[in-house]
Image: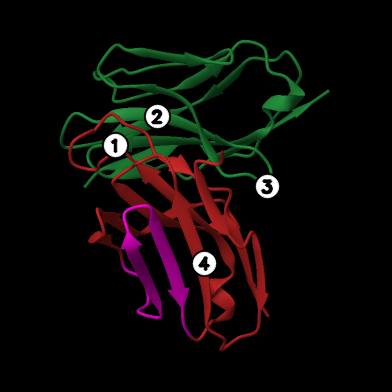
Chain colours: A green, B red
Amino acid sequence: GNSVTQMEGPVTLSEEAFLTINCTYTATGYPSLFWYVQYPGEGLQLLLKATKADDKGSNKGFEATYRKETTSFHLEKGSVQVSDSAVYFCALNDYKLSFGAGTTVTVRA
Amino acid sequence: DTAVSQTPKYLVTQMGNDKSIKCEQNLGHDTMYWYKQDSKKFLKIMFSYNNKELIINETVPNRFSPKSPDKAHLNLHINSLELGDSAVYFCASSISRTQRRNTEAFFGQGTRLTVV
């Protein structure tokens, strides 16, 4: 079956630091890959997506590249802000949406 | 306009009670879902409906019963509530499960259920 594995948190870093959250997947087909973000007390929002190999998704300074050879979709941001504090979920869609366990990120001023 | 709305936002109830959570989407999507998020933020899919037809029914106690009166609504009824049912329940929708592999799901704000 399909599955998503992402790095465990929590992750705590200072403002303007570099953020990486690792995500790898297992799928039998050719899934699309997503990063969702959940701010405190809210539902999940789509952050970015990539639908085929070598695609790069980007939004709000975050980027992730679909790497078929390493089955990865790592999330990166060069300079985080306090407002980026949230839970981040990696997900894949191969006709069924599967989520990773979520990574809690706290950014301190 | 809220795309996916669920009510209530908070629900506190006693063990043994029966309660319902309602969900509506105004996006014209064919597919709707219920997810359960536990205290560690882990998301588990419970049910999925495509055009009012149940297509995913994960290992969920049969005290949980989804109902989809039309493709814009998916309600969740829970009988005989237990302490372990305390969680945040999210409703979501997407264009179509089978036709669009590359489409994302849109989530509601969640219902925080507390069983005391």
Left or right: A49 with respect to B3? left
Q: In this view, does A98 lie above or below B100?
A: below
Chain letter belonging to callout 2: A
Mark 1 sits on what residue? A93
Q: In this view, does B37 lie above or below B69?
A: above
Kind of residue at disc 3: Gly
Q: What element carries label 3?
A: loop
Q: Is mark 4 on a helix, strand or loop?
A: strand
Chain letter belonging to callout 4: B
Q: Are both tags, 3 and 2, on one chain?
A: yes
Residue at (68, 47) in percent of width and height:
A41
Kind of residue at disc 2: Phe
* Label 4, label 2: how far apart the Cα atoms are: 27 Å
Q: Is the residue marked by circle 4 packed among few (<14), some (14-19), or many (20+) residues within 10 Å?
A: many
Mark 2 sits on what residue? A34
Q: Do the residues labelled 1 and 4 touch (CB within 8 Å)?
A: no
Provide residue B74's location: percent of width, then percent of height.
39, 60
Q: Are marks 2 and 1 in contact (CB under 8 Å)?
A: yes
Foreground: disc 1 or disc 4: 4
What label does residue A41 carry, if any? 3
Q: What stretch is highlighted in magenta?
A: B59-79
